[in-house]
């Protein structure tokens, strides 16, 4: 299950390509992802395949027999969880996804406990993992490292797939997958994910989840995007350029109260102050107008949902948690199912899952 042709391309040539040009090099011959690096790799057909598979897995996992079936599926593979940046949900949901499918796991969560501490290069470290494992799931603070690793792995004697679990401020494609899955599930009985308005709020300049989700949403028909943030935290021009190129209706605002009644989904984010150029920079930005509490809840339409990739700080009051429109805890659990689906698909198990689902549910 090697991706097409990546073997023939030098890192310099690959790095110089646009993300859209890179996408065909990351898939298997039937269009299934091999490396998952960018949101731009996913088109509507693939998103529908993946969300459908996640829902089947969810159904199968409800019984002991179903769990037994799933646990056998990929028990011949091992995955390395390489997380050199803090993580709770992404790490645990990938770990759970591996456990559901029977994939054995190893982990590095702190490079000071690996040989990188002795001066081994990052490339040699990941090449070492590829000797023992069949997949690397990686989160790093460095933009582009997952991509470089994928290129290096495709050119090694033992190619293995890479899944990007968050790369710097740039991309978080599997978070965007779980966000889309949450939106698809929330609107499936209301005509599907189409003709909706999604409002992004908070630190849009440095939040990678918004950057990936904005791109993924362009696959669905007529999804309007509104970006609400104080000026220093407003969304990047590259994301807006992508929306302009695709003809997606969008606008930026700093008036949260005025926008809430327009929303079908509100996607809150925390201030990403770990990226401050100087400590305390973010604290000088007035973000209180962009918080969601009981006052804002009154303005939210009855069918609308409130999302957050988590972790949250003050941007969503805990007083809102018990409202049925607060979707963030279910959103988090959806992450486990969609990541299970992605791993199963990457290892070519989707047909067996469909078959089991058809015969038993
Ligand atoms: C996000 C991340 O790491 O980018 N968290 C996550 O994966 N659920 C968002 C954040 O840290 O604010």
Image: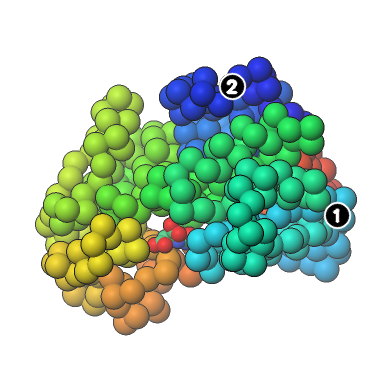
Q: How far from the left and from the top, in percent, is residue 95?
A: 67, 63
The quarter of the picture where residue 268 lies is: bottom left
Q: 114 above or below 347?
A: below
Which residue: 38% across, 50% down? 169
Between circles 1 and 2, the one closer to the viewer is 2
Q: Residues within 10 Å of mark 1 (few under 14, many from 20)?
A: some
Q: Position of residue 346 (x, y in %)?
A: 71, 40
| Viewer-proximal residue among 331 and 104 | 104
* Nearest the eye: 39 or 9: 9
User: Is residue 343 something that shows in the picture?
Assistant: no
Front residue of 215/15: it is 15
Residue beneath the point at 52% across and 43% down: 145
Between discs 1 and 2, the one toward the N terminus: 2
Label 1, secondary structure: give it.
loop
Instruction: Give the Cα separation between the discs numbered 1 and 2.
Output: 34 Å
Would you say 266 lies left or right of 33 here? Answer: left
Residue on which disc 1 sits: 75
Q: Which mark is residue 10?
A: 2
Which quarter of the figure has residue 281?
bottom left
The quarter of the rendered structure image containing the N terminus is: top right
**Residue that extends furthest to the bottom in the rendered view of this protein:** 319
Residue 289 is marked as none
């Amino acid at each position: 299950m090697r991706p097409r042709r990546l073997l023939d391309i030098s890192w310099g040539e690959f790095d110089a390509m646009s993300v859209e040009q890179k996408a065909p090099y990351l898939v298997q011959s039937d269009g299934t992802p091999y490396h998952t690096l960018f949101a731009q790799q996913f088109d509507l057909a693939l998103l529908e395949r993946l969300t459908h598979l996640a829902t089947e897995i969810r159904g199968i996992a409800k019984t002991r027999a179903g769990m037994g079936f799933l646990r056998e599926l990929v028990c011949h593979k091992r995955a390395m969880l390489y997380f050199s940046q803090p993580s709770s949900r992404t790490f645990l949901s990938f770990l759970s996804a591996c456990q559901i499918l029977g994939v054995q796991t190893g982990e590095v969560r702190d490079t000071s406990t690996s040989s990188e501490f002795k001066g081994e290069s990052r490339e040699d470290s990941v090449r070492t993992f590829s000797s023992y494992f069949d997949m690397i799931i990686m989160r790093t603070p460095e933009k582009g490292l997952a991509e470089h690793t994928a290129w290096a792995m495709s050119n090694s004697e033992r190619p293995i797939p890479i899944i990007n679990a968050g790369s710097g401020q740039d991309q978080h494609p599997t978070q965007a997958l779980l966000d889309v899955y949450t939106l698809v599930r929330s609107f499936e009985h209301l005509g599907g994910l189409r003709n909706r308005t999604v409002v992004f709020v908070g630190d849009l300049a440095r939040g990678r989840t918004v950057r990936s989700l904005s791109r993924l949403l362009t696959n669905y028909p007529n999804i309007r995007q509104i970006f609400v943030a104080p000026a220093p935290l407003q969304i990047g021009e590259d994301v807006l350029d992508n929306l302009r190129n695709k003809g997606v209706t969008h606008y930026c605002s700093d008036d949260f109260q005025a926008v809430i009644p327009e929303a079908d989904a509100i996607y809150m984010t925390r201030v990403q102050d770990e990226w401050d150029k100087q400590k305390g920079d973010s604290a000088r930005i007035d973000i209180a107008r962009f918080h969601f509490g009981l006052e804002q809840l009154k303005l939210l339409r009855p069918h609308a949902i409130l999302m957050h990739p988590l972790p949250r700080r003050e941007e969503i009051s805990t007083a809102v948690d018990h409202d049925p429109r607060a979707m963030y805890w279910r959103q988090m659990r959806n992450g486990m199912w969609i990541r299970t689906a992605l791993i199963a698909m990457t290892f070519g198990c989707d047909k067996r899952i469909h078959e089991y689902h058809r015969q038993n549910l």
